[in-house]
Amino acid sequence: MKQQYYNLVGGLPYLEHFERATNLPVTRLRLDSQLHSLTPEHYAQLQRAEDLVVWERQPVTRTDAEMIVEVQRGLDAISDPGLHDFVEWRLDQRTVIVGLRRKQLSLPVPNADDAWGVGRFRRWIIEHWDDADFRLTAVFPWIPNVRESLASDNALEIERTWMNVVWQRLSRVADEEPFGFAAVFAFVFKWDILKRWLSYDAQAGKERFVELLKEVIGEHQRFFA
């Protein structure tokens, strides 16, 4: 039987959709104190997952090659099937965006051994490089929108698109297990999306655009952003 967290989930505030919200309903300090109600195993796995997918936790000193090794170690440490699937899916998204950006810059097709991405679709992207969307729109319907946003240098729209996709996925995950671990980690990652979105303003959006373009092609050795 799966671990249930009735009191923890019941004590979490409602998260308004990030495009409508005006504030964070709970601080990270308060949220962390509530997360200690998780079993030690679940707490450790959630921390590991956040290390892999939350932008602020990415160390700037690691190369992409080092990060790829760390990602595999991190995935191996996440035994909860739902959390493992979500993290793997998020990393797949990033690899697709890296591929789109490389194509937009007319960079060569990556070699199989290049440290440019991770996940289940890395080789598929290389093999379908000549297709505008890598023949992946059935799996990732957002690809055309992101490709167009990259072409028009609209970083904020890229952020909006992937945030909506991730938010919707997390909502489905939580609905399938409303008082289980899935509901908890869905809340945590939604909270991070909301925090990140609320931090943007017009100038920050412009600055973030420059950073995004550098990150997704490894100019800062930070593909995992």
Image (tube, rainbow, N blue to C red):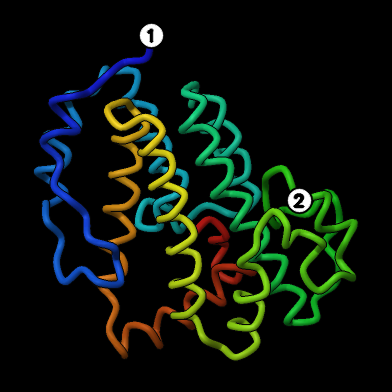
Measuring 60% from the left and 34% from the top, which residue is drawn there?
Answer: 72
User: Residue 129 versus residue 207: which sits nearer the camera?
Assistant: 129
Q: In this rendering, which labeled residue sits more in front, label 1 or label 2?
A: 1
The disc, 1 or 2, on the residue closer to the chain's N-terminal end is 1
User: Residue 9 versus residue 117: which sits nearer the camera?
Assistant: 9
Q: Distance between the Cα atoms at labels 1 and 2? A: 35 Å
Q: Identity of the amino acid at label 2?
A: Arg
Left or right of 97 on screen, residue 115: right
* Label of residue 122 in the image: 2
Kindly state the secondary structure of the residue where label 1 is placed: loop
Q: Whole-percent x and y of residue 77?
A: 50, 24
Q: Whole-percent x and y of residue 198?
A: 24, 71
Q: Whole-percent x and y of residue 222?
A: 53, 61
User: Residue 193 versus residue 103: which sits nearer the camera?
Assistant: 193
Q: Is residue 116 above or below residue 217?
A: above
User: Residue 197 versus residue 112: which sits nearer the camera?
Assistant: 197
Task: Report crowding for label 1: few under 14, some 14 to 19, many 20 or more residues within 10 A (C-alpha).
Answer: few
Q: Is residue 58 above or below residue 105?
A: above
* Label of residue 151 in the image: none
Measuring 29% from the left and 44% from the top, which residue is drawn there?
Answer: 188
Q: Identity of the amino acid at label 1?
A: Met
Snapshot quadrant of residue 164: bottom left
Please name the residue that numbered disc 1 is placed on. Answer: 1
